């Protein structure tokens, strides 16, 4: 088990320690990187590429509607292969499976237990895929977002590490200017930045907030 200092900052410190070990070894490790979109993967890939041979794994059955899923997938593929020069592979797009897994949590607000379960569903499939492909490490770009719970993400990853024959790369990718760098790279490469996380519930919540803001602006 990794020696992780206590508290939220401990994950980033543990990440820096792992990177230092890999750097000192002089040998890159293999990494399966779950990605939800090109903007979130941008600064993460830039940070990890010197130390890992990266394969991006696009597994996001939560994204709604399918048209949105396709747009994000193709841009992520293009960015990975043609700009960042890393491998890209896609998981199965099965929204019915995702809805079935989350059906008891439909009334949860964004950032609650439904999101936590969604992290686990996508991360577990990534860990399973890494084991199948005999890839040494797995992790996710999710923690680069300030809207995602990095503590949940790391706890889930470390639990999955015990279940599958692969190592979880702990981190909080928003740290070390990671989130701001993702914004810079998105502007530089004109990446599509969506207005909601991905699922129909986040779409509805985002739409409601935009409508409220629009009404307030019209009044003022």
Image (tube, grey):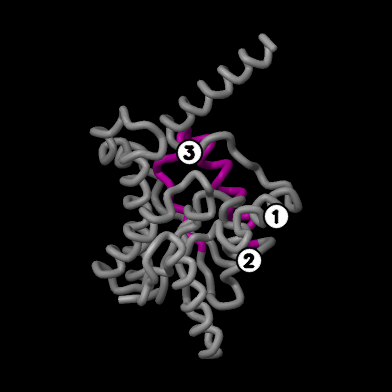
Q: Position of residue 74 (x, y in %)?
A: 58, 48
- Tell me the residue at 28%/63% (across/down): 159
Outermost residue toward the right in this view: 188
| Quadrant location, the C terminus | top right
Which residue, given by chain and number where applicable, does mark 3 sit on?
198
Q: Of helix, strand and loop, which mostly describes the magenta segment?
A: helix
Q: Secondary structure at mark 3?
A: loop
Write down the region rendered in magenta: 56-81
| Alpha-carbon span between mark 1 and mark 3 | 21 Å
Q: Is residue 27 above or below residue 91?
A: below
Q: Position of residue 206 (x, y in %)?
A: 52, 28
Outermost residue toward the bottom in this view: 25
Q: Which residue is nearer to you in this view: 108 or 132?
A: 108
> Is residue 219 within the magenta segment?
no
Which residue, given by chain and number where applicable, does mark 1 sit on?
185
Q: Which label's residue is closer to the chain start, 3 or 2? A: 2
Outermost residue toward the front in this view: 6
Q: Secondary structure at mark 2?
A: helix
Q: Are marks 1 and 2 in contact (CB under 8 Å)?
A: yes
Q: Is residue 72 above or below residue 196?
A: below
Q: Secondary structure at mark 1?
A: helix
């Amino acid at each position: 088990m990794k020696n992780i200092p206590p508290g939220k900052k401990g994950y980033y410190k543990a990440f820096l320690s792992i990177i230092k070990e890999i750097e000192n070894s002089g040998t890159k490790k293999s990494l399966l990187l779950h990605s939800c979109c090109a903007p979130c993967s941008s600064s993460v890939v830039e940070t990890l590429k010197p130390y890992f041979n990266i394969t991006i794994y696009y597994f996001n059955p939560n994204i709604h509607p399918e048209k949105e899923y396709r747009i994000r997938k193709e841009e992520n593929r293009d960015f990975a292969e043609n700009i960042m020069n890393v491998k890209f592979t896609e998981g199965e797009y099965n929204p019915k499976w995702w809805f079935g897994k989350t059906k008891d949590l439909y009334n949860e607000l964004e950032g609650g237990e439904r999101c936590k379960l969604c992290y686990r569903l996508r991360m577990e499939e990534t860990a399973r895929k890494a084991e199948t492909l005999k890839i040494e490490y797995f992790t996710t770009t999710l923690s680069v977002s300030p809207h995602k719970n990095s503590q949940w993400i790391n706890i889930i990853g470390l639990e999955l590490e015990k279940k599958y024959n692969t190592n979880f790369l702990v981190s909080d990718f928003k740290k070390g200017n990671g989130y701001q760098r993702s914004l810079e790279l998105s502007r530089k490469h004109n990446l599509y930045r969506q207005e909601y996380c991905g699922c129909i519930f986040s779409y509805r919540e985002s739409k409601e907030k935009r409508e409220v803001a629009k009404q307030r602006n019209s009044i003022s």
